[in-house]
């Protein structure tokens, strides 16, 4: 009897604890972020010392590049230490607005609703600047087929579920001379909310007339398997013959996945590469908030699925040295950090946008109030 | 309650003031701990419920029976997830209960020499200590490719049965259920074994004394005596299966389109929460909280059912 009682109580409390833990682990990771996050707002006196520690948080897509930039900058100026937590764009914006970080990062430009929540103590408005371009590829797993071409009709069909097997007439037409297998297509998408999904669906929404699910960080996919995180999608593609899924170029490159050549708006088939993706940003006109949107670039040589990712800075820093340093770091990253960006599979910003970013950064008030 | 500590009978032993304080202090301390568990539970339920209100108001009970999860248009319904939670847990139990109870029997009787039995007991318990992400990875990289062949065969030959009507892809309800079964197996085996071992040796001796065979003793005396403990273990395992997040998220395919096929991708409530919480906002958060509340309710239901079942079985026994 004793053991029975124990078991029953154990059963109940264990399941409750499991549930609680489940919920806790899912909560938007607001508090346990940057180890020194507390230094962001109140401790203004730190700037006088020799080391300047800066904390940022946000988007995961540009994380490898940011880590590289901040590590490189530390070599240029060892007094500056920047730590960046890739907690996701949504959490990045949230922490930025709650002033628990020194800068935020997001794959999407700030929404008006978010701008309205900007803390008054930090000046008139957020300083939003693009940092780099990311581009999304369709990676696939088909033995012996290394150069898959997908027309707009084909990839639209794959994502909306109307193209079901690899030897579909549309795909055969795109790839003359290639024997495509009679294997079902397993479309793989992200199951968690993701900036990559936002970039991809924005393009699909524009390019595919039959697409009904709209665009956003997470959408209601008509078909396919959902995998969590870039690594989940990568694993699913690597393992499943006949799989195809979207991921950032840098990620696909690192995992050595095969990437499909896609047809752009002008009708050309473009192999994904940083150069082709940079063409998509040619002549792009940023708006007043320096947001650039190219859901379906017009250029003849432009790779079709491209987007910018943004840094969010405050107009005023309680610690003037921090504002000054951040300004320097961003300017450095956009100019001297270009090679690192290309190496890692990101798109360096075109010069005219870099100039605009520099003048925007000048609006950061470095004099403490 | 408080009066029971006083010594009204005035028995001969004498207690010092100090021991009285220690006794009372201990009693209060443990009461506070016990209350703390209850208060935490209530606080979680309350908080989850509170945050779910916008979604409850908007979707009502229809939320339970609609299979939509559309953050773009803010339309939510958790039917696929509720179904996925129930079907994966059910299938996991279906696979794990016979095996688990069987393991418990062989490890509680003296079929095996102790030199073999002891390490086996240890290994079964060790199975429970493996982190769920390892199970998930194992499922993805080893079990899924291994099962691809047999499952394909099932699909090719039996696709007229709705349960096998879609091509298996390595992610889906079937594989999540199988991995869940392995994960809950040690719970069932360990607890069942404990309750089988706990059956008084007198009963066994008596049964043998009356001329019962080992079969009869096992199935008519030992197992019926231990049944409430076994059911307790099964229910604990069910609770674990319903709440399991990591491995299921990695394996189930996370699709909110409902399908009768076990090879199709599905989702569970915990997987949904794990996937969507980080980047959710507004009504989506409320709907996730609503889904969490439903999971809470399901867990409660399982525990109440377990309680009832155990009581029923016990009465029958007498």
Image: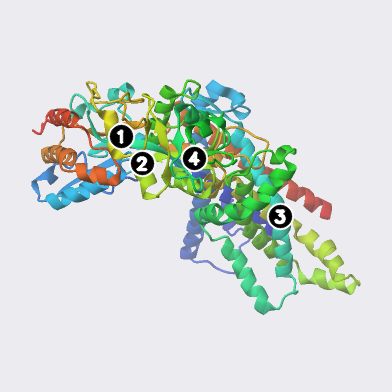
Label 2 sits on a secondary structure element that is helix
Q: Between marks 4 and 3, how big is the CA–CA gap?
A: 38 Å
Dot 3 crowding, Cα within 10 Å, few <14, some 14–19, many 20+:
many
Q: Position of residue B233 (x, y in %)?
A: 67, 55
Name the front one of labels 2 and 3. Answer: 2
Q: Between marks 2 and 3, how big is the CA–CA gap?
A: 46 Å
Q: Position of residue A144 (x, y in %)?
A: 49, 48
Instruction: Using the image, name the chain to which the residue with label 4 belongs.
Output: A
Instruction: Using the image, name the chain to which the residue with label 1 belongs.
Output: A
Q: Between marks 4 and 2, how big is the CA–CA gap?
A: 14 Å
**On residue A277, which mark appears?**
1
Residue drawn 32% across the image and 31% down it: A307
Instruction: Using the image, name the chain to which the residue with label 3 belongs.
Output: B
Name the quarter where the C terminus of chain B is drawn.
Answer: bottom right
Question: Is A315 or A177 nearer to us in this picture?
Answer: A177
Q: Position of residue B181 (x, y in %)?
A: 64, 53
Kindly check if marks 2 and 1 are in contact, taking CB atoms under 8 A apart as contact.
yes
Q: Dot 2 corresponds to which residue?
A: A249
Q: Position of residue B182 (x, y in %)?
A: 62, 56
Q: Dot 3 corresponds to which residue?
A: B97
Residue drawn 56% across the image and 23% down it: B59
Q: Dot 4 corresponds to which residue?
A: A244
């Amino acid at each position: 009897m004793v053991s029975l009682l124990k078991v029953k109580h154990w059963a109940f409390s264990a399941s409750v604890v499991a549930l609680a833990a489940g919920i806790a682990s899912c909560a938007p990771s607001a508090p346990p972020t940057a180890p020194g996050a507390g230094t962001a707002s109140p401790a203004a006196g730190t700037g006088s010392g020799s080391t300047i520690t800066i904390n940022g948080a946000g988007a995961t897509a540009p994380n490898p590049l940011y880590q590289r930039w901040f590590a490189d900058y530390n070599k240029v100026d060892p007094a500056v230490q920047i730590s960046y937590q890739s907690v996701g764009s949504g959490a990045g914006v949230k922490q930025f607005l709650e002033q628990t970080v020194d800068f935020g990062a997001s794959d999407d430009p700030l929404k008006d609703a978010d701008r309205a929540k900007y803390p008054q103590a930090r000046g008139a408005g957020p300083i939003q600047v693009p940092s780099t371009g990311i581009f999304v590829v369709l990676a696939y797993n088909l033995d012996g087929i290394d150069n898959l071409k997908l027309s707009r009709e084909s990839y639209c069909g794959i994502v909306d579920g109307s193209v079901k097997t690899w030897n579909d007439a549309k795909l055969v037409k795109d790839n003359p001379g290639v024997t495509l297998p009679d294997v079902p297509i397993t479309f793989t998408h992200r199951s968690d909310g993701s900036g990559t999904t936002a970039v991809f669906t924005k393009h699909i929404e524009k390019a595919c007339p039959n697409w009904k699910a709209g665009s956003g960080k997470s959408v209601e996919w008509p078909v396919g398997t959902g995998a969590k995180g870039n690594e989940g999608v990568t694993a699913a593609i690597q393992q499943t013959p006949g799989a195809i899924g979207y991921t950032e170029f840098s990620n696909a490159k690192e995992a050595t996945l095969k990437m499909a050549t896609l047809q752009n708006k002008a009708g050309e088939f473009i192999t994904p590469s940083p150069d082709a993706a940079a063409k998509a940003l040619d002549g792009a006109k940023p708006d007043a908030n320096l947001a650039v949107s190219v859901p379906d670039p017009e250029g003849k040589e432009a790779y079709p699925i491209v987007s910018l990712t943004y840094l969010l800075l405050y107009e005023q820093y309680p610690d003037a040295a921090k504002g000054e340093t951040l300004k320097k770091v961003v300017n450095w990253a956009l100019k001297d950090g270009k090679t690192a960006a290309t190496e890692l599979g990101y798109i360096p910003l075109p010069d005219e946008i870099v100039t605009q970013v520099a003048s925007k950064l000048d609006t950061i008030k470095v004099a403490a109030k | 309650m408080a009066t029971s500590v006083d010594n009204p009978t005035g028995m001969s032993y004498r207690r010092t003031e100090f021991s009285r304080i220690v006794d009372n202090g201990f009693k209060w301390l443990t009461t506070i701990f016990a209350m703390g568990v209850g208060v935490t539970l209530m606080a979680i339920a309350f908080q989850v419920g509170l945050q779910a209100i916008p979604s409850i108001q908007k979707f009502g009970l229809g939320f339970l029976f609609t299979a939509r999860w559309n953050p773009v248009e803010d339309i939510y319904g958790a039917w696929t997830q509720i179904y996925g939670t129930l079907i994966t847990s059910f299938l996991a139990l279906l696979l794990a209960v016979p095996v688990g109870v069987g393991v418990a029997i062989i490890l509680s009787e003296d079929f095996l020499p102790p030199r073999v039995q002891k390490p086996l007991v240890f290994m079964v318990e060790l199975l429970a200590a493996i982190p769920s992400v390892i199970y998930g990875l194992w499922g993805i990289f080893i079990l899924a490719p291994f099962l691809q062949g047999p499952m394909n065969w099932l699909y090719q030959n039996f696709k007229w049965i709705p349960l096998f009507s879609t091509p298996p892809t390595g992610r889906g309800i079937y594989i999540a259920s199988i991995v869940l079964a392995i994960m809950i197996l040690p719970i069932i085996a360990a607890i069942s074994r404990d309750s089988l071992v706990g059956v008084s040796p007198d009963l066994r001796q008596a049964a043998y004394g009356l001329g019962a065979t080992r079969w009869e003793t096992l199935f008519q005396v030992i197992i019926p005596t231990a049944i409430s403990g076994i059911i307790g273990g099964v229910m604990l395992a069910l609770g674990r299966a319903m709440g399991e997040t990591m491995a299921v998220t990695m394996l189930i395919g996370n699709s909110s389109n409902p399908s009768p096929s076990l090879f199709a991708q599905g989702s569970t409530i915990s997987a949904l929460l794990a996937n969507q919480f980080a980047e959710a906002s507004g009504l989506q958060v409320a709907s996730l909280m609503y889904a969490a509340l439903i999971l809470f309710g399901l867990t409660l239901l399982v525990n109440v059912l377990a309680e009832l079942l155990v009581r029923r079985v016990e009465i029958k026994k007498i």
